[in-house]
Image (cartoon, rainbow, N blue to C red):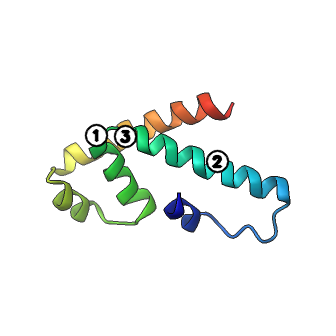
Amino acid sequence: YRVIQQAVPDTKNKSVVEQLENTELGHLISDCIERLPNKQSRAFAMKALQGYDTETICEKLGINRSNYWVMVHRARTTLRAQLNKAWY
């Protein structure tokens, strides 16, 4: 959750309700990422949250670029579905 919290814009000018919703959403996103298969989770987090470039991610995970893009696509699709189900 800390990595997501750092990636989220500053909430100083937000109302208490908006701050709570941001916190709740951050926890929900973290939970959803943790439920992804291990390599999908790692690839997604490394790109979206930690800002690694594709080449570095592929190197660290021992995968090729095609596998990487498939994993990230699947991760995004799964996260979108999980968030829609949980949030709405």
Image side of residue 79 versus residue 14, left or right:
left
Element carrying mark 2: helix
Image side of residue 50 versus residue 86, left or right:
left
Q: Amino acid at mark 1?
A: Val
Pointer 2: what residue?
A: 25
Q: Is residue 44 above or below residue 80?
A: below
Q: Quadrant of residue 45?
A: bottom left
Q: Furthest residue to the top?
A: 85
Pointer 1 and pointer 2: residues touching (CB < 8 Å)? Answer: no
The mark found on residue 52 in the picture is none
Q: Separation of disc 3 and disc 1 at Cα?
A: 5 Å
All told, the count of numbered labels is 3
Pointer 3 and pointer 1: residues touching (CB < 8 Å)? Answer: yes
Residue at position x 42%, y 44% in the image? 34
Residue at position x 21%, y 43% in the image? 67
Q: Mark 1 or mark 2, which is nearer to you? A: 2
Q: Quadrant of residue 57?
A: bottom left
Q: Amino acid at mark 3?
A: His
Pointer 1: what residue?
A: 70
Image side of residue 7 versus residue 62, left or right:
right
User: Which is more toward the observer, 75 or 28?
Assistant: 28
Q: Amino acid at mark 2?
A: Leu
Q: Quadrant of the C terminus?
A: top right
Element carrying mark 3: helix
Q: Is residue 84 above or below residue 34?
A: above
The mark found on residue 73 in the picture is 3
